[in-house]
């Protein structure tokens, strides 16, 4: 769901969307209008936090697996559940 809410074309890469915060809108790469993620996107970081806890608390093979699983779940949430929204300001 990295399509622009204005022009409905690809606004940014998935990686850029994953590091985008709700208070830092950027310009769409196609139309140039300001887009961002809603504040609910902060909740998507919970799997990363749980993955870090797993990396610290679990023994070695499981700690790496927990961290990787948390990162993969975060990217999946960003890709399929968090929409881009327009930032008209």
Image (cartoon, helix red, strand yellow):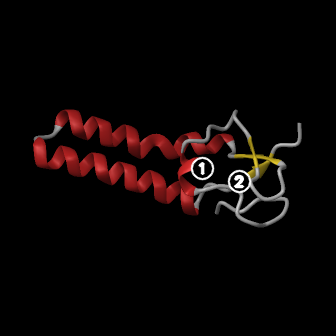
Secondary structure, mark 2, is loop
Q: Quadrant of the N terminus?
A: bottom right
Mark 1, other Cα within 10 Å: few <14 / some 14–19 / many ≥20: many
Residue placed furthest toward the bottom: 9
Q: Is residue 82 above or below residue 43?
A: below
Mark 2, other Cα within 10 Å: few <14 / some 14–19 / many ≥20: many
Q: Is residue 88 above or below residue 28?
A: above
Classify residue 31 as left or right of residue 49: right
Residue 68 placement (x, y as % from top left)? 30, 51
Residue 59 placement (x, y as % from top left)? 10, 41
Q: Nearer the viewer, mark 2 or mark 1?
A: 1
Secondary structure, mark 1, is helix
In space, the residues marked 2 and 1 are separated at their CA atoms by 9 Å
Task: Give the residue pinned by disc 1.
Answer: 17
Q: Nearer the viewer, residue 16 or 41?
A: 16
Residue 21 placement (x, y as % from top left)? 62, 37
Residue 9 placement (x, y as % from top left)? 75, 66
Classify residue 71 as left or right of residue 21: left
Q: Residue at x 34, y 41 (%)?
A: 50
**Contact (Cβ within 8 Å) of mark 2 with mark 1:** yes
Task: Give the residue pinned by disc 2.
Answer: 84
Q: Residue at x 60, y 56 (%)?
A: 13
Q: Residue at x 78, y 59 (%)?
A: 30
Residue placed furthest toward the right: 89
Q: Is residue 32 above or below residue 53?
A: below
Q: Nearer the viewer, residue 2 or 12?
A: 12
Q: Residue at x 61, y 41 (%)?
A: 20
């Amino acid at each position: 769901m990295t399509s622009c809410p204005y022009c409905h074309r690809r606004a940014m890469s998935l990686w850029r969307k994953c590091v985008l915060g709700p208070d830092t809108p950027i310009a769409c790469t196609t139309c140039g209008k300001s887009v961002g993620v809603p504040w609910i996107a902060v909740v998507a970081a919970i799997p990363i936090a749980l993955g870090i806890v797993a990396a610290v608390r679990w023994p070695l093979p499981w700690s790496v697996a927990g961290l990787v699983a948390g990162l993969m779940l975060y990217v999946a949430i960003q890709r399929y559940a968090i929409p881009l929204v327009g930032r008209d300001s």
